[in-house]
Image (spheres, rainbow, N blue to C red):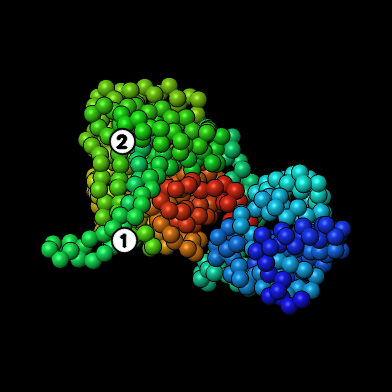
Amino acid sequence: MAAHQKIKNLTELGEILGKARQEGKRTVLCHGVFDLMHPGHILHIAAARKQGDVLAVTITPDRFVRKGPGRPVFSEKLRIQTVASLQDVDYTALNEWPTAVETIARLKPHVYAKGNDYTNPADDLTGRIVDEENAVRSIGGEIFFTNEESFSSSRLINQFFSTYPPQTEKYLKSFRSRYSADQVIDCVRGLQDLKVLLVGEAILDQYRYCTPMGKSPKETIVSTRFENEEIFAGGSLAIANHLAGFCKEVTLITMLGENTDQRRFIDSKLRPNVQLKAVVMKDRPTITKRRYLEPNFLTKMFEVQYLDDRPVPDAVEKDIRSRLEKCLEGHDFLVTADFGHGLMTKALREFVSSHGKFLALNTQSNSANLGFNTVTNYQRANFVCIDEPELKLAAARQYGDLHRLTDEVRRRIQVDAFLVSRGPLGSLIFSDHEPVVHTPALATRVVDRTGAGDALFSIASPCVYKKYPVEVVGFLGNCVGALAVEIVCNRDPVDPTLLLKFIKSVLM
């Protein structure tokens, strides 16, 4: 049979395998990405073929491949054509789901074949091999682990098909020589016992997608047609969700307006291990930032903010402080996310600076507070994370060497580790005990930059608390940042499993 004749959709493949079963034939299913066809794949497929009379191979679609930067290297069309060209393959189809669980239920193979690297479920970062094994048993089939020589697609791709520029590849080669993927993954897993206390403004991010129609004939404005809307849990809500993916428990102290629909939405978006302790403000709304975007390229046209950013009243300030005092002892460290919208008053800044616990601090400059909400409003922090423009505002210097500017700011506040994020230029980390560490950006595809800095801050803070090497902090921070810029706003927090797969892929 010619290769193109072997390619079917799942419905067609289900009918073919069903007929084969009726004829008493034994059916076998393999499933995978097969991004770079190598000898290990060919030996695996050949071994699977021996387990039955008909071998089908399903391919993970491009949209579900989460193997790291620039993956898949080869499109789903090329991958399925390559698999179909193998003599041992009878049929192939493009999967419709992220895993093979639903596919197994639909195709009902007698045998589901996996490589020997999945023999130990503990080695599977996704944990999905257990789900697939259960799916096979539920339809009366069996799982078979081939025992052929294996190769790493990720290692081969990193060596011959890298999507990174030479300087980034040089950095990764050097980093791989000092840290294995398993060592870095152990660092991420080492955060799972932490209890984090977080204080900062909750923000609702609204994206209103509008298609530009052109200039109005009677006005000097561009008209747009409303398409649809999305609402995201942003600000400290997003940081809480990111932290909760890596840590055992997060308690969030913040303020909200009286709108019960907004409160229900926020509750529905928080991870189960986030405990929300919100002060309800009767005279001001939950901070909402409504952005109008062109839907195809997510081009932001303008923004409307709903907020009252005056310092909170004395009674609210005392309430926030009381909640912080009560929670401090039950948590390992404090994270402060100061968006400059009125929650963190002068007195609260002084309190979090002086309470004595480990303090991770992020202050953000935006259109509502530009120049007024700098990190120098605080007296002390163990870890500070800001971006380059925020550093320059804190130093009151538009130009100058970043190392010198950072030294100037660090002389004004007591801080142990200081991370400066620089977008496509990566990040710099300054500390008292190690040389300055530069980590290049690891993103290869940018969908939306909104919220990426919050994600970086969320992984870096517990890592600094754990006293991980600074270069590991920089690497993990930029891995999370690379994943975050592929997510629209704060539609989802960074998935810890995807982070582990990213690390594995990049460091192979």
Q: Could you say where residue 300 lies in the image, as x and y percent from the top left?
A: 31, 58
Q: Residue furthest bottom?
A: 2
Q: Which mark is residue 211?
A: 1
Q: Nearer the viewer, residue 289 or 330?
A: 289
Q: Is residue 178 visible?
A: no
Q: Which mark is residue 286?
A: 2
Q: For the residue marked with disc 2, what is the amino acid?
A: Thr
Depicted 48 relative to depicted 139: above or below: below
Q: Which mark is residue 46?
A: none
In the picture provided, is 145 more to the left or to the right than 304?
right
- Which residue: 38% across, 48% down? 230
Instruction: Label 1: state its secondary structure.
Output: strand
Quarter-of-image position of residue 343: top left
Chain-order first, disc 1 or disc 2: 1
Q: Could you say where residue 471 lies in the image, as x and y percent from the top left?
A: 53, 54
Classify mark 1: residues with Cα within 10 Å, few (<14), some (14-19) or many (20+): some
Q: Are the residues at dot 1 and dot 2 in contact (C-beta closer than 8 Å)? A: no
Mark 1 or 2, closer to the camera: 1
Q: Nearer the viewer, residue 67 or 29?
A: 29
Q: Nearer the viewer, residue 33 or 80?
A: 80
- Which residue: 28% across, 63% down? 212
- Which residue: 81% across, 61% down? 20
